[in-house]
Amino acid sequence: MADLRIKIGSLLFKNPVLMASGTCGYGSELEDFIDIAELGGIIIKGTTLEPREGNAYPRMAETASGMLNAVGLQNKGIDYFEKNIYPRLSKYDTHVIVNVNGNTVEDYIGLSRRIASLEAIPAIELNISCPNVKMGGMIFGTNPGAAAEVIAAVRKVYHKTLIVKLSPNVTDITEFARISESEGADAISLINTLVGMAVDTGTMKPKLSTVTGGLSGPAIKPVALRMVWQAAKAVSIPVIGIGGIMNATDALEFIMAGAAAVQVGTASFIEPRTAVNVLGGINSFLDTRGFTSVSQITGII
């Protein structure tokens, strides 16, 4: 069997298949369907310093080959997380990564400090790219100066593995990949959702309360694949590919384009076992082709 281990910063993952933030809750939501320990890791839902109610309903809408969401980072805040969620997460036999969000640089610093003190959380995914919150979010992900400032500030206070999640809603993804690397990120993950909208012709109103939201699913895969390929060519730190991965073939495309790891997201809403099926498919491909490690095909194109 091929060696699927990958390394990001100083952190060793048993394999390159991760669950994407916002699509697996806190892991327990999928326990009836998969063994979380089989995966390389899970990125739990977006977390903030203070509780957030999220956006008003309706905040999800199905689209052709995908879905729109405008959940708005609904969560109960870091105090609740530490007391009620963390004790259970610490028992998972895989890497648990927290997706970190804020409205200001100070928010990101404060939250990163809190999470740094949690022994069983070895990494954070710094979300500077959420397109469906009213404050913060996109400003950090689409403004080079703001992106550099928040990444540098978090790097000063967070000394474990730092992954920066990038927005596709920019002109040049390589600029933000290079900024992330220069400011100390151990890896980058991309892409976050594209901005989109849908209209209900019956009511003659937008399908989302916020009008626009984040588009995910197979519809965005060609864009995501292109951006991962560009980013991987631009930086020397690992790239984690996200966007429309529905099966092992999709994941292998990202890996061949330069992704050291992949995240499975929207597909889990359709088939909760998608991530483990993707892992099995990667294994089969490598064995059938005679490869001894996943690194042999990483960035092969």
Image (cartoon, rainbow, N blue to C red):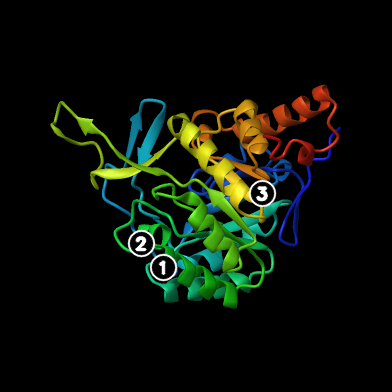
Q: Residue, x 35% and y 31% (percent of image)? A: 62
How far apart are the alpha carbons under marks 2 and 1?
7 Å
- Could you classify mark 3 by the number of other residues whose Cα lies within 10 Å: few (under 14), some (14-19), or many (20 or more)? many
C-beta proximity under 8 Å, tags 2 and 1: yes
C-beta proximity under 8 Å, tags 2 and 3: no
Residue denoted by label 1: 146
Q: Residue, x 58% and y 69% (percent of image)? A: 115
* Residue found farthest to the left: 204
Which circle's residue, 2 or 1, is located before the other in the chain? 2
Quarter of the image for the C terminus: give it. Answer: top right
- Could you classify mark 2 by the number of other residues whose Cα lies within 10 Å: few (under 14), some (14-19), or many (20 or more)? some
C-beta proximity under 8 Å, tags 3 and 1: no
Residue 85 appears in view: no
* Type of the residue with mark 3: Gly
Q: Residue, x 55% and y 67% (percent of image)? A: 82
Point out residue 50 in the picture as x, y percentages from the top left corner: 40, 69
Res 64 → quadrant? top left
Residue denoted by label 3: 41
* Residue found farthest to the top: 288
How far apart are the alpha carbons under marks 2 and 3?
28 Å
**Left or right: where 288 falls relative to 300:** right
- The kind of secondary structure element at disc 1 is helix
Point out residue 151 in the picture as x, y percentages from the top left corner: 52, 68
Which circle's residue, 3 or 1, is located before the other in the chain? 3
Residue denoted by label 2: 139
- The kind of secondary structure element at disc 3 is strand
- The kind of secondary structure element at disc 2 is helix
